[in-house]
Amino acid sequence: MLLLGIDIGTSSIKVSVVDSASQQCLASAQYPDKEVSIISHQPGWAEQSPETWWEHVQKAILRVHSSKKYNPLAIGAIGIAYQMHGMVVVDKQQNVLRDAIIWCDSRAVAIGEQAFAAIGPENCFSKLLNSPGNFTASKLAWVKKNEPAVYEQIDKVMLPGDFISMKLTGEITTNISSLSEGIFWDFETNDVSADVMNYFGFNRSVIPSIRPVFSIYGELKNDIAQQLSLKPGIPVSYKAGDQPNNALSLNVLNPGEVAATAGTSGVIYGVSDELTSDPQSRVNPFAHVNYTSASKRLGVLLCINGTGIINRWTKDTFDSNLSYAEMNEEARQIAIGSDGLKILPFGNGAERMLNNRIIGAHIHNINLNKHTKAHIFRATQEGIAFAFRYGLDIMRSNGMHPQIIKAGMANLFLSELFTEAFVNATGVPVELYKNDGSIGAALGAGIGVKAFASASDAFTNLLPVKMVEPTNIDAYESAYQHWEELLNKQSIDNEQKETVCQQSF
């Protein structure tokens, strides 16, 4: 059986076709070629059009078919991975009512903080494992408060993957993993959270039908099958957020195993079997893809909003003619520590690990007689690696102590410089794999239709391409300490400015 995986990213859609027998990818395609922009009507806002996602999904599928490396009619199941924490709302006719409010949007921070206080910290951490924060439920509450005409028309609220599944099958469904990342799930009652629904005044009917992660969410509609040259009736049999799915794609399923990604955002995602939470909700536990009430598997997620996006900004701003490989090579000519130049990579919305503050991106200590664009390139990747270290220290304080971290050879992990900075700053070796989210989604679909005896059996042929171990911890530790001092000073400065602004009103 062939399996189709769809990965709904922030910058593009990627699809892959995988042979379940060999677990090998036969073909992959991405659409569009140019990264999709984020709509930002106001500072801190971030939206995208769900209908544009759907258009790009279709074009990506047709593009991968054009490879002629397989028979599209041999595809037997579809899996979907998607950018987490987004919100799509539709009416009873399945019409989209507004653009999706996506993961890095900060508008609902205050709403989430008010909900946290009203529901109570103890209830939030024992039942939700998180503060409502800036997650999907709080975004829906923002719409209710600020766009009542839209809210009144809402029939269902969905995560991005639920929306694409709806377009393929006509059925609106979700799962526990998705609901937990939206802060709709109560881990004590093992049901939709009455506390959240009652506090915000949401009707239970807005929640889609709940299925297991690996299950049949619906069958491909005839007209869509014809448009996409696929067999009618094949099932969508897997849906998961991009980080749980990335962990699945790396066979990270058991307590103590840890995965990382460094795309538009940066993530460390560790699996735990304990229903615990960070007392400041700086890192966030959600139901992993293999979570059940009998076998609890939580994915503890550290998210840094501004990783790959600042690396791209740096290249485009300082030398748009360079390829990433050329930029990385220039950066490698600069010494560890970037000759004192430091960059804080926090320019893409509120950072949960920084207590939902908008710190902003900053360049510190620039010397106009010494520093070049190569210094900027290196300081950017070091700053991203140091942000990972800062977040990993939070995870360590919560009992997560990875001995090894698995990552796909993609995005920033294609940079030898970044990978070296990451392993030396964190002190943790990294295993790199030739795998990605769309391949993971395809294999997830195979698990959903029982093409494999178990989830782990889908990855029997998964082997690391290389291992990168720390070799220069002391030099990176010194550079990190200077970086952390600047971050702490910037955080204090921002807090003082916020206090002055609040007192002036």
Image (spheres, rainbow, N blue to C red):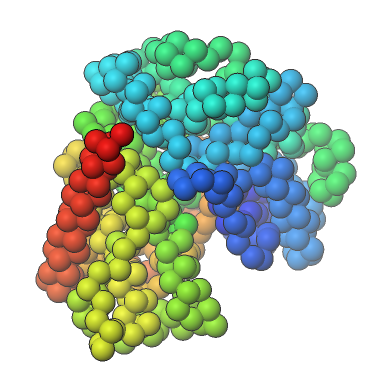
Say whether residue 396 is left or right of residue 439. left
Give the answer, above or below, for where 346 lies relative to 374. Answer: above
Rendered residue at 40%/79% (across/down): 328
x, y percent for residue 69: 75, 64
Residue 329 occupies quadrant:
bottom left
Report the number of numbered marks.
0
> Is 374 situated above or below 59?
below
Residue 111: % across, % down: 40, 27
Residue drawn 59% across and 30% down? 158
Q: Looking at the image, which is closer to me, 142 or 96? A: 142
Left or right of residue 28: residue 502: left
270 with respect to 314 (left or right):
left
Residue 481 visible within the image:
yes
56 vs 177: above or below:
below
- Viewport quadrant of the C terminus: top left
Q: Residue furthest front?
A: 504
- Kindly tell me whether residue 407 is visible in this rendering: no
Q: Could you tell me which residue is drawn at 60 percent across and 39 percent down?
A: 100
Q: Quadrant of residue 388?
A: bottom left
User: In the picture provided, is 285 more to the left or to the right than 61?
Assistant: left
Please provide percent x and percent y for residue 501. 28, 41
Residue displayed at 74% across by 36% down: 167
Q: Nearer the viewer, residue 355 or 4?
A: 355
Q: In the rendering, at what x and y percent does residue 482 appear?
A: 15, 66
